Amino acid sequence: MKEESSKAGLDMNVKKTKTMIISRDPEGKKVDIKVDNETLQQVEKFIYLGTLILEEIKTDKEIERRKNIAKEKFSSMAKILKSKRLKLATKLKIVKCYIYSIFTYGCEAWTLSKVLEAKIEAFKMWCLRELGNVMWKDKVTNESVLTKLKTKRQLLSDIQKRKLKYFGHIKRKNNILTTVLEGKLEGKRPRRPPWNNWMVDIEEWTYLPAYTCTSQAPDCDLWSVNARQPSEVMTLPDTRYQKWHLLEQISIPLIQLQLQCESTLFN
């Protein structure tokens, strides 16, 4: 790698180059890679392009890290955000621009669970309570805070939309990212409860199986309809009847849109 990169004028800094093993069970595994007779350091975690990468490839620590960075930025801007000279709408725009953008950096790669989704909602409510000067000891419900600030729960919905759009982008490009997403690891799965994976979020938010998502994603107009509707899916209770009812409501407009596109092309 060093020789080939040197031909293009890119020199490898051996001291800053690290190695890592990505595995379900990375404990005790070692890798020995040498460059210029110097062994590269093996690490358990590494920050690459602003994102924390762990050996186990879990999202919880990265979300916790982004939350702490966003809270630190919020505290540094507390005088502005709590100023009485600014309108509430202006404060909400500042929070969305400076705080939420820090927290959601790289969220397209997150694998979410119900626990992590609850943590995301808790972070949003923390920001809104600080913005509205509402203390936890005041025993004010979250719905009351949302009503007072005239806003809605949109942070988790925005993350879902960004991830769905990124899925469509990967499927349309058909490059190494597509290979990584569709590829399978060799060997047997260990005896443990199955971990949630990146693709499961796409299936749950669209209520469509993986093969249907894969077939619809190349059509940009068709997939954009799915990418705009995850918030409606998440607000319904988890019952079988409502799932199928919602699936019917979503599928019929999608089929009609597809037929219109096909008729336009043939005409």
Image (cartoon, helix red, strand yellow):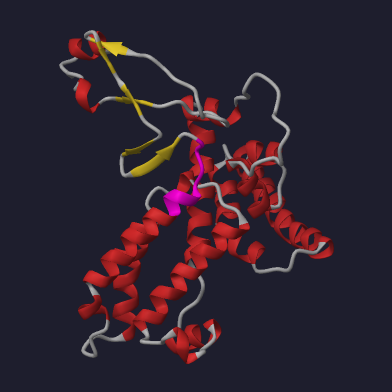
Q: Which one is in front, 214 or 252?
A: 214
Residue most toward the front?
28
Q: Is residue 161 above or below residue 5?
A: below
- Residue 250 image position (x, y, % from top left): 70, 58
Residue drawn at 41 percent across, 38 percent down? 53
**Residue at the spot 55% in from the left edge and 84% down from the top edge:** 143
Q: Is residue 264 left or right of residue 66?
A: right
The picture places residue 47, in percent across and down from the top left corner, at 33, 40
Residue 162 visible in the current orientation: yes
93 relative to 142, above or below: above
Is residue 229 at all visible to an observer of this figure?
no
User: Which residue is depicted at the point 35% across and 81% down?
Assistant: 131
Which image quadrant for residue 45?
top left
The one nearer the camera, 62 or 98, is 62
Asked where in the image residue 77 lies, by quadrant, the reply is: bottom left
- State the quadrant of the C terminus: top right
Left or right of 165? Residue 253 is right
Q: Determine the residue positioned at 78% across, 58% down.
A: 248
Residue 57 colored in magenta in the image = yes
Q: Is residue 22 above or below residue 124?
A: above
Depth check: give the residue in front, 27 or 98: 27
Classify the position of the N terminus by image quarter.
top left
* Count of labels in the image: 0
**Is residue 155 shown in magenta?**
no
What's drawn in magenta, residue-wise? 56-63
